[in-house]
Image (cartoon, coloured by chain):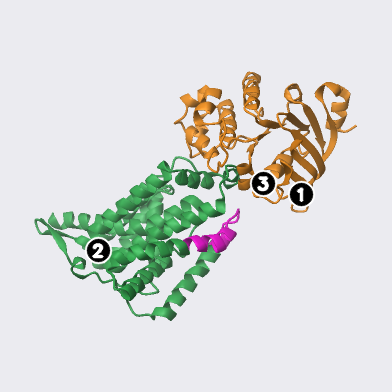
Chain colours: A orange, B green
Amino acid sequence: MALLETCNLQAFYGDFQALYGIDTRLEAGETIAIIGANGAGKSTFLKAVAGLVRRPAASVLFDRQPIGALSAADVVKLGIALVPEGRRLFPSLSVEENLLIGGHGRKLGGPWTLDRVYSLFPILKERRSQAAPTLSGGQQQMAAIGRALMSNPRVLLCDEISLGLAPIIIADIYATLPRIKAEGTSVVLVEQDIAQAIKVSDRVYCFQEGRLSLVGRPRELTREQIHDAYFGS
Amino acid sequence: MTGALDAVIQGVLLGGLYALFAAGLSLIFGVMRLVNLAHGDLIVLAAFVILVVAEKLGLDPFAAVLVAAPILFAIGFVLQHVLLNRTLGRDLLPPLLVTFGLSIIIQNGLLQLFSADSERLRSGAIETASIALGGGIAIGVVPLLTLLSAVAVIVILNLIFYRTPLGRAFRATSDDPEVAQLMGIDHNRIFATAMGLAFVVIAIAALYLGLRANFDPTIGPARLLYAFEAVIIGGLGSFWGTLAGGIVLGLAQTIGARIDPEWQILSGHLAFLAVLAIRPRGLFPRALD
C-alpha cells in the first residue's frame, strides 16, 4: 500500500504550467529519487506535495487520504516534512532554536528529539547556541535536515541536499540516511547528483520539462535510458 | 545645575511615554514588516476604549485597562486576520495605503462618537502626586510609572520573543514566512497574535497618554510621528533600542523646552535628524537585515 501517492499532479505558477500529470508512488520504508535537469519541475513537485504550491485536492494522497487541499502548515502536522532547497535556516534563530522550531506544530509522537538529532549530527550540538548563518554549508544542511526531522515525519522530502557541498560532506550527509530510514521514515530525494541519488534509492523518477520521462528501479535502468530521459532524445 | 539635572530627569521620564508609543510599532514592524500608519490613532482609540470602560463600569483607569486589554487584543487579532494579512506581500504600498485609510476612518469614527472635545482619564490624587528628590527636584508619580511600565513592557516583550515558543515562531515567521509554514506555523495566525499583543502594548500606552494629558480624536498622527522617531533613533528590530530611542527623544524635547519653550517639538525632530545623519541605522540596530 502506497504511503504517498501523486495522481495526475498538475502545478501552476500563474499561467505557467510547471507540472503535467505526474504519477508517483512511495511505499512505506522506501526511498525514491527524483532526477532531472534544471527547470524540469523537481522542486515544484516537492513543493506541491508539501503544500507550498497550489494543486488539485485529489492529486496528492497520503495514507490514501487526499491532502491536496491542505495548507503547508497542516501537511507537516500529518507527517510530511520538507528540507527546502538552499537549506533556508532562520537567520535570526540559533542552531538549537532552528531545530526546536521544527517541532513547533508537532502533533505526532515519535523518535526524533533534540538529543536524537544531536546524536545524528554531533557537530550541531557543539554549535547549538551559534546563530544559524555562522554555520558552514554542510552544517547548515545538517541543521535543515534535523529541523525537518523534529516534526517526526513519516515522509521526508529532501530538495537538493548535496547542492554546493564538497563530496566528502555529501558522503557524510548521505551516510545518515539509513539511520533516518531505520526510524520508520520514508524519503523522497530530489537530486542533481544522479549517481548519489541512484545509489540510495529504490526507484528513480526522471522529470523532463514538467513531465515524467522515465520510471524504474536503478539496477534495471541503463545509462542511455537515463541520459535520454534527462536530456531528451 | 539643578535645572539641567531636572531637565534630564524629566526628559528620561517623558522618554518612557514615547517608548510605550513606539514599542507596539516596533513589534508590528519587527514581526510583520508592516509599517502601521494608524498606530497613533490606535493609541487614541484605545484611550477612548479605556475611558468608556472606566465610565461605564465605574472603574479607575488602572483597573479599566485590565478590562480593556483583552478587548483590544481581540480587536487587533481580528483586524490583522481579516484585513491587514491580505495587504502583506512583496509590495510595500498596500499596507501603507490601508493603514493610512484606517487612520482616517478611526479619526472620523471617534469624532462621530465622542465629538472633538478633549477627554482625560481621571485617577484621583495619583495624577498630581509627586516624590521630592531633594534639591528642589521632584518627579511625578504618573511619569515615573510610565517609565517603569515602559521598561516592564520591553522586558516582557524580550522574554516573549527570546524565551518562548511563541516568540521563536514570531522571529521565524519574520525571517521567512514560507519556510515557517513548513514548520507547521500558520503565519496568518501568528501575525494576528502579534497584532493582538501589539494592541495590549497600545492599551498600556493609551493609559498613560490619557493620564498625563488631554486627548481628542485628532492627536493620533503626532503620536505616530514620535513613535516612528523613537523606533528609528533606537534602530529597527531592537526593543531596548526602542526604549533608548524614546528616551533620546524625550531628553531632546525637554532640554529644548528649557532653552526656549517653543523649541520643545523642534528639538526632538532635530535630535532625530542628527541620529539619522550620524547613524542611519539607529543607535542599536539588529545585526542582520
Q: Which residue is mark 3?
A: A52
**Would you identify the image quadrant in which residue B128 lies?**
bottom left
Q: Residue, x 37% and y 72% (percent of image)?
A: B48
How many labels, in total?
3
User: Which is in the foreground here, disc 1 or disc 3?
Assistant: 1
Q: Which residue is mark 2?
A: B257
Residue B101, horizontal then vertical, whole percent: 52, 69
Q: Is residue A86 visible?
A: yes
Chain bearing mark 3: A
Residue A76, horizontal then vertical, whole percent: 62, 42
Q: Residues within 10 Å of mark 2 (few under 14, many from 20)?
A: some
Residue A28, horizontal then vertical, whole percent: 71, 32
Is residue B241 found inside the magenta-colored segment of the image? no
Image height of B5 relative to B121, above or below: above
Q: Is residue B196 left or right of residue B98?
A: left
Image height of A65 relative to A168, above or below: below
How far apart marks 1 and 3 lie (CA) works out to: 16 Å
- The residue tagged with tag 1: helix, strand or loop? helix
The residue nearer to you, when weighing B279 against B229, is B229
User: Which is in the foreground here, disc 2 or disc 3?
Assistant: 3
Residue contact between numbered discs 1 and 3, judged by CB atoms under 8 Å: no
Is residue B81 found inside the magenta-colored segment of the image? yes
How far apart marks 1 and 2 lie (CA) works out to: 69 Å
The residue nearer to you, when weighing A171 against B257, is A171
Asked if both marks, 1 and 2, belong to the same chain, the answer given is: no
Residue contact between numbered discs 1 and 2, judged by CB atoms under 8 Å: no
Which one is earlier in the sequence, the residue at label 1 or at label 3? 3
The residue nearer to you, when weighing A65 against A121, is A65
